[in-house]
Image: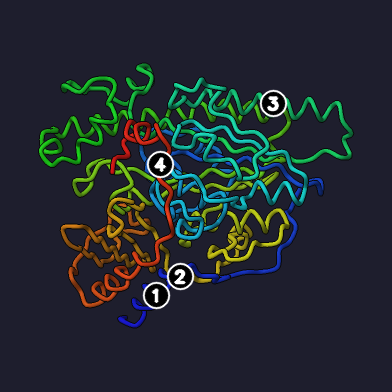
Amino acid sequence: MNRMLIGWALALLVPTTLALGCSPPRRAELTDGEPANLLLITLDTLRADHLGSYGYPRPTSPALDALAREATRFTDVTCSMPTTLPSHLTILTGLTPRQHGVRRNGELPGGELRSIFHLLREKYGARTASVTAARVLDPKYLVGLGLDEIFFGDDAPAEVRQVPAPEVVRRGLRWLDEQLAGEKAGSEMERPPFALWLHFFDTHEPYDPDPAVARRFTVGYSGSLGPELAVDFLVGLNEPANDRALSAADRRYVVDLYDAEIAEVDAALATLFTELRRRGLWDDLLLVVVADHGQAHGERGFWGHGERLLEPVIRVPLLIKEPGQRAGRVVESPVETLDLLPTLAELFAIERPTGLRGRSLVPALRGEALAPLPYRVVERRFYPNQPERQAVALHAGRWKLVAYREPEGSDYHLGRLAGAGGLDGEDFFTRDAAEARLLAEALADLRHQLPRHSPLAAGDEEMLRSLGYVD
Ligand SMILES: [Zn+2]
């Protein structure tokens, strides 16, 4: 056990080039032999266990649940870092935060990062675009990712910091219609595919759902909390006194509003899916739905995401619908959002970029077993003013090891996850175990190997604070 843990720790020190389960790329199974179109949907701050298809009893997600019935649904997915920009860059490039070098929000990527958009552009001449919904994914952070066009909401003005789901859908459809109009004018034979990324932010703080939607989830609440919960209020719940001041009904109400926000995004996705079908695009799509991280609602006294590597914070949904797919499939093998880029590369018959640690999930899409994964890694974001602060979570099977290194001292948890999904787990029974200490010693060495970080641009610090990211 000790030796294995040392191995894990050492593996963290150096970006690995493991090519687990690497197999020769093959062409995606497409209905007409043409390259398919890619639609990537990232749902910010969406914990997996609040979707109906992941077992949630409330009607938060009828459109996503219907999609799950004709897609492959991965039940056990962890993100690379529960922080928006680093996690998204992992999804788009297949690189760990340590590899791509962006380990906090507000940091510009140091150079061009080869993303799925580059790969599709180079191989197929794909037209590529993104529509993002929060300034934490402002277009300026996305330059260099191989996107032809980068939109913020439905062309929202500069002072707008986040935009609601319907605006994202509207802008995305408008871009698609522009591509379709171009197709009609051009030759059908030379029709390039498109790759569109839509980002939704509604489930992030603040919680301010449409009152009509909120009423469906808040029935019976008569406490003192209002219809909008501000970022400061929600982040402030991490003060133990504020957390203690909440009644049980208040706690449920906070979750009610979060669920209403999910329902709002889901309704916008229902519109999107209907419109895609109406345009005849549905069956040619490779459709991916994933989240950058989850969200805690008072579990172990923690609210939000980023800081603590709790299960509700790091577990995300992942749905992949292949072109023409009609039957749903469920994959319970543990996977990471790191695996998405190798998967897309194989599906699109693109040579796998070098240096990726993730595995292609294509065998799982075909009902075959995935190569065993020795462990999964989730890291906490980097604090430039306190570089010694570190946190890492390792999952191996049903075991989870979490190490926090803080200015006030270190804390280690080693335990077994309860239940198949682990969402009710974290029932740690060992503290300061010898294995955990060894891992912590290795973590101490990490700070000497941190990549250089550029200072935040003027104005960004205030923007990030308004979204609840405070150092
Ligand atoms: Zn996020």
Task: Give left or right: position of 437 versus 278.
Answer: left
Which quarter shows the C terminus?
top left
Q: Nearer the viewer, mark 2 or mark 3?
A: 2
Tag of residue 278: 3
Q: Amino acid at mark 2?
A: Val
Which residue has dot 2 on it? 14
Q: Earlier in the sequence, mark 1 or mark 4?
A: 1
Q: Nearer the viewer, mark 4 or mark 2?
A: 4
Which residue has dot 4 on it? 456
**Label 1 – label 4 distance at C-alpha:** 30 Å
Element at badge 4? loop
Disc 1 and disc 2 in contact, CB within 8 angstroms: yes
**Label 4 – label 2 distance at C-alpha:** 26 Å
Disc 4 and disc 2 in contact, CB within 8 angstroms: no
Which residue has dot 1 on it? 10
Q: Nearer the viewer, mark 3 or mark 4?
A: 4
Q: Residues within 10 Å of mark 2 (few under 14, many from 20)?
A: few
Tag of residue 224: none
